Amino acid sequence: MADKNNQILEEVTGSDYKYGFYTDIEMDQAPPGLTEETIRFISAKKNEPQFMLDFRLRAFQHWQTLEEPKWAHVDYPPIKYQDLIYYSAPRKQPKYDSIDEVDPELLETFEKLGIPLDEQKMLAGVAVDAVMDSVSVGSTFKKTLAEHGVIFCSFSEALQKHPELIKKYMGTVVPHTDNFFAALNSAVFSDGSFAYIPKGVRCPLELSTYFRINAANTGQFERTLIVAEEGSYVSYMEGCTAPIRDENQLHAAIVEIIAHKNAEVKYSTVQNWWPGDKQGKGGVYNFVTKRGICEGENAKISWTQVETGSAITWKYPSLILKGDNTTGEFYSVAVTNNKQQADTGTKMIHLGKNTKSTIISKGISGGKSNNSYRGLVKTTRNAANARNFSQCDSLLLGDQCGAHTFPYLDVGNRSSIVEHEATTSKISEDQLFYCLQRGIDMEGAIGLIVNGYAKEVLSKLPMEFAVEAQKLLSISLEGSVG
Amino acid sequence: MNTMYTTLIKDKLLELFETEQHNIRGNATPMVNRIRKHALTRFKTNGFPTTKKESWRFTDLTPLLNTEFAFDFRNQSKSTDIEKIFTCDVYDLDTYSHTLLNGWLIYKHAPLTRLADGTIVGSLAKAMEVYPDLVDRYLGKAAATEQHEMAALNTAFLQDGLFIFVPENTNVEKPVQLINIVNAEQPVFLQPRHLVIVGKNASITLVHCDHSLTHNISFTNTVLEVFAEEGARVEHYKMQNKGRNSALITHSFFHQKENSRVSSNIITLNGGFTKNIVEVTIDGTKCESDHYGLYLVDSNQHVDNQLNIDHRAPGSTSNQLYKGILDDEAKAVFSGKVMVRRHAQQTKAFQNNKNILLTDEAKANTQPHLEIYADDVKCSHGATVGQLDPNAMFYLRSRGLCERTARQMMMIAFAGEVVQKISIDALRARITNMVEKRLKGELSICEQCVLHCNSKEPTSFNIDLSKL
């Protein structure tokens, strides 16, 4: 019985990455290396206003003074920053009026991924701003959004059309001095997404961006900025799959969210970058700085993430609860397999009165992987009546993997209540037995239990995403069973 | 600026190690001197721990080191009439009592005594002369000088402390009590070193108290190594009730073999700066390891409890429960870590830290960490920071209790969970009494200690009614 279990676990946890393919599109690249020249090149290439170039240069100067942080529970060979290519764009100038003009090879890529960009877009009702190696190639549902006054476009486009908004908000949540990777991103970011929801508008569509890394040796530096004005609502989805490449690829993105008074932002991620092969060769380094600020009263931001990919996931989507009565939520499922490593969690900084935060984190580790939850809950002296509840569970599938929990609780006043609880265990024999006894095979039983275990988080995802997330969980864990 | 002090004192210590070499080495065995040298090299490279180090992130040593400390490495172990200096006032506590004065063991008859059951208790300095083999076999084997800078420093300068050897199948009937007294006119920097070896199926209870007789600045950096052999049972109690000007760093290293059982209980009532590091290595199957802590701190006290349990062998159980009540501007840090290694299957580990903050100025930092590499385990941890339960308060109020009494009752019950774990009746009664007094605000001055100083003045209570 135990042997059989192990065998199935191995099959389940040893399955291949299904989204591995490589699109052959000509690239327009910057020469490898990082100097002030590279930054000027990127900035000039993108025809950016002066303030942007100044911002990049300031960030670059600061980055040069920093050392790469080493405290995370992850292990990787040193990154040679001077060997990376910091800019790469599809050469055929992507200025399309309709979807038909898009490179058919690209469309094929998206179809393999199941992105509802073509006909499916109507059915799915999703406005997609697909980002392929840093340059936005197609946007849909612009019209519907425009009617409501919602701005949703690529970061470069926003820089041309709405420089005042970018100037006002960029770097206010994640300053260029924030950390090593944030400074690097601020210096060299190539593109990203910008969303602006005007006062009182409930965004009629779920905004979605698919990121893909395509060219080999390209650091992908995305930058997302979401501004929700007073009383607005938006649900934003970010999903990613990357093709199999042999060398490690660095992904150091920045996501900034600003929610004003009474605004609500829901940010969902399904991350499935290439995790590397079973020997731990290759794979994406996902070192992302994500942070939101609940600026005004009653604002609410929630992060939901399903992390199944990347060789290394190292990120802490954080929230600053600045306004009174603001709410922050963090729901996460992180699956690691083979030799994947994840060190992820969140930070909840309570500054305002009566602020609330909830953290639900489910870690699943299999193979020879390591999965860590690391999180901070901080309440300052003035954050009266702050309330936090955190639950961080880990599930171990196999005796070669590791599951770790590193919570930090800093409480600075008497009226806040902060609670943390965590458990670590393997799939219970009783539950397995029950399923088997009801005629479900072992693989199905494991899938069922894992899905049930993650349900609390999956149910927080928008419907379209939930389907994909469940599919991903199946692929990550259930081998051929889907 | 601040780092200047640490550099100054580090340089001074390194210099003293050379100039005072003769005194420091004393009669230590060549093996011990080798360990010493090794530890010094570590200290030379690593220096004092800084807030950049994860386990010292919230505890800054630099302000404490900004003092002209007096160092004296001459052997001060001597025969003294202890009662003239100090008497333990827990009168019904029947123990084999040993006293450490400024880091040196003082004794009535002989520095090292053999009890009727064969147990050897006494000065470590003397034990190095009389039982060199025994000391060589154990000393420094549990105290990890790589990870712990302060333990490295202690090892480099180790001279005296308590030495206990309990032979196989021996049950030491009375608890062994160690009273650590600091009585100095000048600021002192002390580094006592204790070694406890508990043989197969033997058992012992240790009671460890820290006291200061003067209000001078003192810095005590203690290392205790406890070796629990197969089937051994060790109970360790530590009471900390020192003056505001004292800084106390205590490392307790427990090394557990098969079927052994260790429990530790650290009660911190008063003290300016306290850092307790408990490091447990479970090296055999079916061990039990229970660690409890209680800290009731006020004014600008700083207490930091660091607890690492390393499960290296399968089938063992560990349990951590630390509770604290923080008043005024007190600051408490808890960092617990449970490490379950790949082979340590069927491990059960539980970790819990609960804090109550009474003011907005108090601060609690808690980090209950789990690091697990085995899959067939049951591990859980929890941490809470909050206030007294309003429902319970309502219940008590509805029964006609005034708010003040209700609060006290709830706080006493909160602390009771840890106090009840004390198995020595006399000590438990005493601590319960102390905790009650402390929570009623009658013990917020350092003079009122567990085994209070032998002053003839009547005790005066400074009750601050506004706090209640």
Image: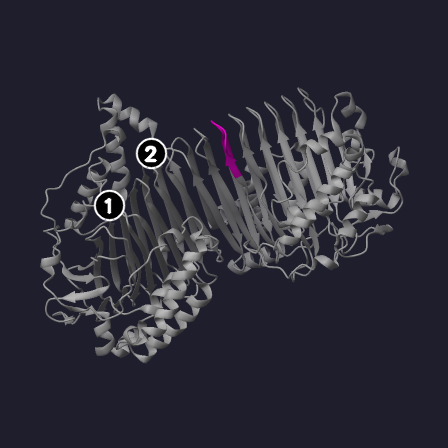
Judging from the image, what secondary structure is the residue with disc 1 in? helix
Q: Is residue B293 above or below residue B150?
A: above
Residue A295 appears in the figure: yes
Question: Do marks 2 and 1 both belong to one polypeptide chain?
Answer: yes
Q: Quadrant of residue B123?
A: bottom left
* Residue A118, label in figure: none
For residue A473, side relative to residue B446 (left or right): right
Can residue A352 be found in the magenta stretch? yes
Residue B459: percent from left, percent from top: 13, 41
Specify the subunit that label 1 lies on: B
For residue B252, side relative to residue A317 (left or right): left
Name the residue at 88% across, 36% down: A96
Can residue B297 be found in the magenta stretch? no
Which is more toward the observer, B298 or A396?
A: B298
* Residue B358, label in figure: 2
Specify the subunit that label 2 lies on: B
Residue B355: percent from left, percent from top: 35, 40
Q: Which residues are magenta?
A: A348-358
For residue A208, side relative to residue B279 (left or right): right
* Residue B419, label in figure: 1
